[in-house]
Image: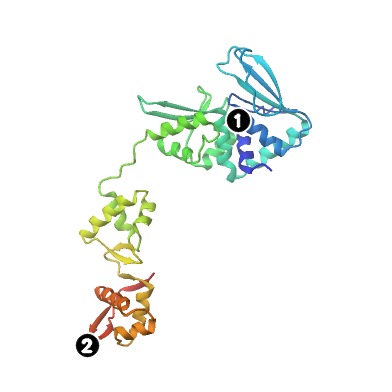
Amino acid sequence: MTSEIQKAQCVGLWLAEGDSTSKSEVTLTNNNSNIIVLFHNTLSKIFDFKNNPRVYVYSPSLDIKPTLPINVEHKYYIDRRANKPYFIYRIAGVSLVNDWRNIVSSMTKEEKFYKNILQGFFAGEGNIKFIKRSCSRTIRISQGQPNLTLEKILKNLNVKFIFSPDQRAYVISGRENLEKLANINIGILHLNKNEKLIEMMKTYKQYHFPKNYLKNEIVKILDKPFTSRQLSKLLNRSQARITRVLVILHKKDEVKNFRVHSVNFWVNKNVKIILISKRKQQILDLLNIPRKTSEISKLLKISWKSVFRRLKELEELNLVKRLDGLWYKIKTEKEVIAF
């Protein structure tokens, strides 16, 4: 069984470069041997071929006779206009064509396959236009006429585009749009195109935030406890950078931190909460009546030293106090949360 992903990718390839008018053959044209091999291997797993597939190879000269690593008949022809060899893959069968069209119709209606179909579109008819001198970055998908299926997929992915009749292509530009396409690995099926895409995207500089952006955002977010790692993911900045800002805010007394299980939790200084470990909460629960350290140690079955250290930490948080050898719980207006 072939994967649904490969099937959807081949749907995109066929929509981009296949012959959608033929009622007797499924065909695909491409100059990339890996694309033809993928298409053949995928269809051969879907269908029980009644007829043998064929590959027609067109080259500038018959001295060039590339052979694909698939067990199908190859026929060679000259096309002097071709800069490099290209392949036309054909498999005949009226019922096969009907079944394939049904697969295409079904998959183009399901959003879960859109990114894979688009990967096929790009492998077939996509290209990268990148001019370093002017920092012009564009992805184009060639189509002689507007393609409603392609437009539906791009709109679903929130990618803005224009159709240029002069270029006979869909033109996509702008960092936000290009990053959306790069993030779905639009070039995954075509090595050369993918390398060009990666090279182009690397030329974008890192986003620059307005002055004090991070400080202001962190202070707003910290209406509840977060670790620096969690803030890093939320704000898409390195954990080291977030930690530096937190230290600055802590020195300015704008945020406070609580260390629980060797992890620092940060919160806005105006939030009335105290974070403690579950062990400290157990100790607090026992202090509904005043107790000695040794008594708490026996009740919890942990060492005296460990209990004493936890009590001193609770004392620093103004949650307990010691008087005449006994520990007392201190009432607080703040919410005590145990992790």
Residue sitting at x 31%, y 63%:
267
**Label disc, if present, on residue 119 of the rendered structure:** none
Q: Position of residue 232 (x, y in %)?
A: 36, 52
CA–CA distance in space, label 2 to label 1: 83 Å
Give coordinates of residue 54: x percent, y percent: 71, 25
Q: Which residue is mark 1?
A: 35
Residue drawn at x 59%, y 38% is 117
Mark 2 or 1: in front is 2
Specify the quadrant of the image occupied by residue 329: bottom left
Q: Which residue is mark 2?
A: 324
Q: Is residue 123 left or right of residue 220?
A: right
Query: Crowding at label 1, few (<14), some or many (≥20) Cα neighbours within 10 Å?
Result: many
Quadrant location of the C terminus? bottom left
Q: Give the residue furthest to the right.
A: 50
Q: How many marks?
A: 2
The x, y position of residue 57, in whole percent, is: 65, 20
N-term mark: 2 or 1: 1
The residue furthest left is 252
Q: Residue at x 24, y 86 (%)?
A: 325
Q: Label 1 amino acid?
A: Ile
Name the one closer to the observer, 13 or 48. Answer: 48
Residue type at numbered disc 2 = Asp
321 vs 111, nearest the viewer:
321
Q: Residue 195: x and y, percent?
A: 47, 31
- On the question of residue 162 being in view, the answer is no
Is residue 297 visible to the viewer in this orientation of the structure? yes
Left or right of 3 on screen, residue 177? left
